[in-house]
Image (cartoon, rainbow, N blue to C red):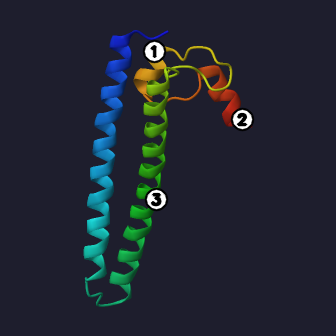
């Protein structure tokens, strides 16, 4: 079981990351809006703009997924179940949580889950 200090540390890390992602999402939205106003001169410009938009969309999607994971982890902290594997209900190792603050599974269950 995690101590109050450890829970507070993870909560602060998750909150900091949430702020960073929200800023990234807003910055990317602003950038995409400004790109709509750019006049494309030829097919090469259009190809570059399309490629950049596809990359930005993929990044936005990944950031949204991470934001959802962060919200889930913060909710688990509120409910007192943070750091417990969703599969086996055993504690998730502190080392794993330090690498991935919003980990939902212990190492063993993560490997099983990825093979499914």
Q: Nearer the viewer, mark 1 or mark 3?
A: 1
Query: What residue is pinned by disc 3?
Result: 58
Point out the tag, 1 or 3, that comes first from the N-terminus: 3
Point out the tag, 3 or 2, that comes first from the N-terminus: 3
Which residue is more in the foreground, 96 or 74? 74
Task: Please state the horizontal and vertical placement of residue 58, each as a whole percent of the image.
Answer: 46, 59
Residue drawn at x 37%, y 68% is 52
Alpha carbon distance from label 1 to label 2? 23 Å
Point out the tag, 1 or 2, that comes first from the N-terminus: 1
Residue drawn at x 39%, y 62% is 56
SS assignment at label 3: helix
Alpha carbon distance from label 1 to label 3? 30 Å
What is the quadrant of residue 115 in the picture?
top right
The numbered mark at residue 94 is 1
Task: Please state the horizontal and vertical placement of residue 113, each as a whole percent of the image.
Answer: 68, 33
Residue drawn at x 32%, y 29% is 13
Q: In this view, does 60 lie above or below 95?
A: below
How packed mark 3 is, by other alpha carbons closer than 10 Å (few <14, some 14-19, many 20 or more), is few
SS assignment at label 1: helix
The numbered mark at residue 115 is 2
Which residue is more in the foreground, 42 or 112? 112
Q: Is residue 15 above or below residue 27?
A: above
Which residue is more in the foreground, 103 or 51? 103
Of all residues, the one furthest to the front in this rendering is 79
What is the quadrant of residue 40 in the picture?
bottom left
Alpha carbon distance from label 3 to label 2? 24 Å
Q: In this view, does 75 lie above or below 82?
A: below
């Amino acid at each position: 079981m995690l101590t109050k200090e450890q829970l507070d540390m993870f909560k602060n890390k998750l909150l900091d990351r949430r702020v960073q992602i929200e800023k990234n999402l807003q910055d990317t939205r602003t950038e995409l809006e400004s790109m709509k106003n750019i006049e494309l001169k030829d097919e090469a410009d259009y190809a570059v703009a399309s490629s950049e938009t596809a990359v930005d969309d993929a990044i936005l999607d990944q950031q949204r997924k991470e934001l959802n994971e962060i919200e889930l982890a913060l909710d688990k902290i509120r409910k007192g179940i943070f750091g417990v594997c969703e599969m086996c209900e055993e504690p998730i190792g502190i080392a794993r949580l330090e690498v991935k603050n919003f980990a939902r599974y212990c190492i063993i269950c993560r490997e099983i889950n990825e093979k499914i």
